[in-house]
């Protein structure tokens, strides 16, 4: 009986303390600390500090890198009106610590495969979805290659960064070719290298790369990112096809269609043309087809361009 | 032999009475809690991180048991004056040392065995129902038997640390023994630096001295193959055998010296 009384008293006091804290937080809201400063930035120092627990320390830094990236991305997407800073400034603001965190992670555990591969995506993605630092993404992957020179996946990823984010097709082709030379690498890398070198960027190659990423993605968010990119590529194709119809109508009638209904009544289309997420494309007064601002596929990526003119 | 076994069992019982095995509850809570949370935080690296966490926790919990019980094995008997009731009995002093060591080794083995089972249990739970295609992308299977190699080497390293703690316990106070044992533990992790001293110092004498210290200090870094095992890299059986043989010899040396020091102590 006495024990029960003590337990009840302790529970009551704890609940009361929590309620007082809640009242204090209502009156004086606590500030959200977004200071992501790193006390130790040297990987070799951390290796020593963590003694025999290097892999566990690497895991901690990996979790921190994910939280840091996710937090920065969320802050930026919650404030879409915030103008994008120039690319080099972007990485020195919201994503300032990202490379350091990934560098520490991979120094503590040099075989942390995912930290190189996903980390490169976090770094290379255009601002505000990522740091917009393709150069650092390549640097991270090259660090991985120094540890595992036979890792064709890192070479493919470097090629991908050159292709998709830097639009440097010569470098991209060289890395795809190098990856294709590694025993055990998939046989589509060599043809991809040849196509990239001959034609520069084309949508088919982009689709092959994103499809490959979708099929090999080990985690949901990367799979979702690849699906998103593939939908965007499909949307770009839809827009081109729809634009051709609109242009034909404009040519035939001497003025652009006022809306999709005009085209439907003229028998040019059967109804609203929807993007892969089911949102109708927008038709501007001057006859341009574009994604609706409400579409989750916004903003469409800057596509790699063909070296031999329009696709 | 009988006397040693009796002392060992007694040490084990005492550690159970001292609630040492409670650490297993903390270990289980840590792993189960982490397995629940990590899935949300690690971008698909939960199995790798649970392995890292499980092996690291095994090593840390074991280290604390080895040090904090090891340092009291002899000194506590002296402080409590219970050593006076032991010495007149028909046992040699070395038997007391070896028996105490064997008892703590038994405690560690039981602890590690239960922690290993718990780790495999959590890994089984985490791998349950995961798409085989995703599992193939892992560096090593969730229930990789090679984890046992890492655990065996952690245990061997801890048995060596126990011997160090016991050695200091024969002539020093618990506080000083703890400090010295932790000092040796840290130095043992970085002793390879002494081997490579010639790369930072030109003085031949300093290099010679550093090399000498390197061979004398216990090399504890060699017992750490956690990262290799978690990443599915092979740990050759020869490496395992040589590392364990080193530990056996070093432990034997420490026990011989500890027994000698203890035999020379005057308890009158």
Image (cartoon, rainbow, N blue to C red):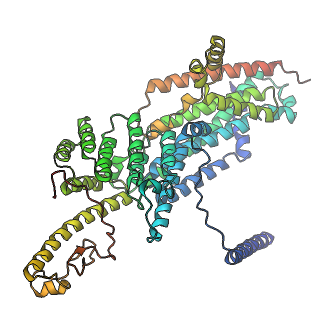
Counting from the top left corner in percent of width and height, residue A181 is at 24, 35
Where B15 sits versus B33, above or below?
above
- Residue A152 shows in this picture: yes
Q: A132 and A40: which one is in front? A: A132
Q: The N terminus of chain B appears in which quarter of the rendering?
A: top right
Q: A249 and A230: which one is in front? A: A249
Counting from the top left corner in percent of width and height, residue A206 is at 23, 55
Q: A121 and A66: which one is in front? A: A121
Counting from the top left corner in percent of width and height, residue B109 is at 60, 37
Describe residue A123's horizontal placement relative to residue A13 as left or right. Answer: left
The residue that appears at 33% across and 59% down in the rendered structure is A223
Q: Residue furthest left?
A: A252
Where A117 sits versus B265, above or below?
below
Q: Quadrant of residue B126?
A: bottom left
Counting from the top left corner in percent of width and height, residue A151 is at 33, 38
The residue that appears at 25% across and 71% down in the rendered structure is A276
Describe residue A279's horizontal placement relative to residue B183 as left or right. Answer: left
Describe residue A252's horizontal placement relative to residue B59 as left or right. Answer: left
Where A279 sits versus B223, above or below?
below
């Amino acid at each position: 009986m006495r024990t029960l009384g003590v337990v009840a008293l302790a529970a009551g006091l704890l609940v009361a303390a929590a309620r007082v804290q809640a009242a204090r937080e209502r009156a004086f809201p606590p500030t959200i600390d977004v200071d992501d400063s790193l006390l130790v930035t040297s990987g070799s120092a951390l290796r020593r500090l963590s003694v025999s627990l290097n892999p566990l320390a690497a895991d901690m830094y990996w979790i921190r890198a994910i939280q840091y990236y996710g937090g920065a991305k969320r802050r930026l997407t919650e404030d879409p009106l915030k103008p994008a800073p120039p690319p080099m400034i972007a990485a020195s603001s919201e994503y300032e610590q990202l490379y350091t965190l990934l560098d520490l992670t991979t120094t503590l555990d040099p075989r942390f495969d995912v930290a190189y591969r996903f980390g490169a995506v976090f770094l290379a993605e255009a601002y505000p979805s990522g740091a917009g630092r393709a150069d650092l993404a390549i640097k991270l992957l090259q660090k991985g290659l120094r540890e595992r020179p036979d890792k064709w996946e890192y070479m493919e990823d470097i090629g991908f960064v050159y292709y998709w984010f830097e639009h440097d097709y010569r470098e991209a082709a060289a890395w795809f070719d190098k990856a294709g030379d590694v025993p055990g690498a998939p046989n589509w890398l060599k043809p991809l290298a040849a196509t990239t070198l001959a034609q520069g960027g084309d949508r088919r190659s982009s689709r092959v790369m994103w499809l490959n990423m979708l099929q090999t993605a080990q985690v949901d968010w990367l799979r979702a990112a690849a699906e998103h990119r593939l939908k965007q590529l499909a949307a770009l194709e839809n827009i081109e096809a729809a634009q051709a119809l609109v242009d034909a109508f404009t040519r035939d009638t001497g003025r652009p269609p006022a809306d999709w209904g005009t085209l439907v009544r003229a028998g040019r289309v059967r109804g609203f043309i929807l993007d892969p997420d089911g949102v109708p494309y927008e038709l501007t007064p001057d006859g341009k087809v574009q994604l609706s601002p409400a579409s989750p596929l916004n903003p469409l990526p800057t596509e790699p361009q063909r070296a031999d003119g329009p696709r | 032999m009988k006397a040693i076994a009796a002392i060992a069992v007694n040490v084990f019982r005492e550690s159970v009475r001292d609630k040492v095995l409670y650490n297993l509850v903390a270990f289980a809570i840590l792993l189960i809690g982490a397995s629940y949370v990590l899935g949300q935080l690690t971008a698909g690296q939960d199995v790798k991180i649970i392995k890292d966490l499980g092996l690291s926790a095994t090593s840390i919990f074991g280290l604390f048991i080895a040090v904090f019980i090891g340092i009291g094995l002899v000194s506590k008997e002296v402080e409590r004056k219970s050593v006076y009731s032991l010495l007149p009995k028909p046992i040699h002093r070395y038997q007391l040392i070896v028996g105490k060591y064997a008892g703590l080794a038994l405690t560690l083995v039981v602890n590690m065995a239960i922690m290993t089972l718990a780790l495999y249990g959590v890994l089984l739970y985490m791998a349950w129902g995961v798409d085989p295609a995703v599992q193939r992308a892992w560096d090593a299977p969730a229930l990789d038997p090679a984890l046992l190699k890492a655990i065996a080497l952690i245990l061997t390293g801890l048995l060596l640390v126990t011997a160090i703690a016991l050695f200091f316990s024969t002539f020093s106070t618990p506080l000083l023994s703890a400090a010295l044992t932790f000092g040796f533990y840290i130095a043992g992790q970085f002793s390879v630096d002494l081997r490579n001293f010639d790369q930072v110092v030109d003085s031949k004498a300093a290099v010679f001295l550093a090399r000498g210290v390197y061979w004398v200090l216990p090399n504890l870094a060699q017992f750490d193959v956690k990262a290799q095992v978690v990443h599915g890299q092979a740990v050759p059986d020869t490496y395992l055998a040589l590392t364990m043989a080193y530990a056996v010899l070093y432990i034997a040396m420490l026990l011989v010296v500890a027994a000698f020091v203890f035999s020379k102590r005057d308890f009158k």
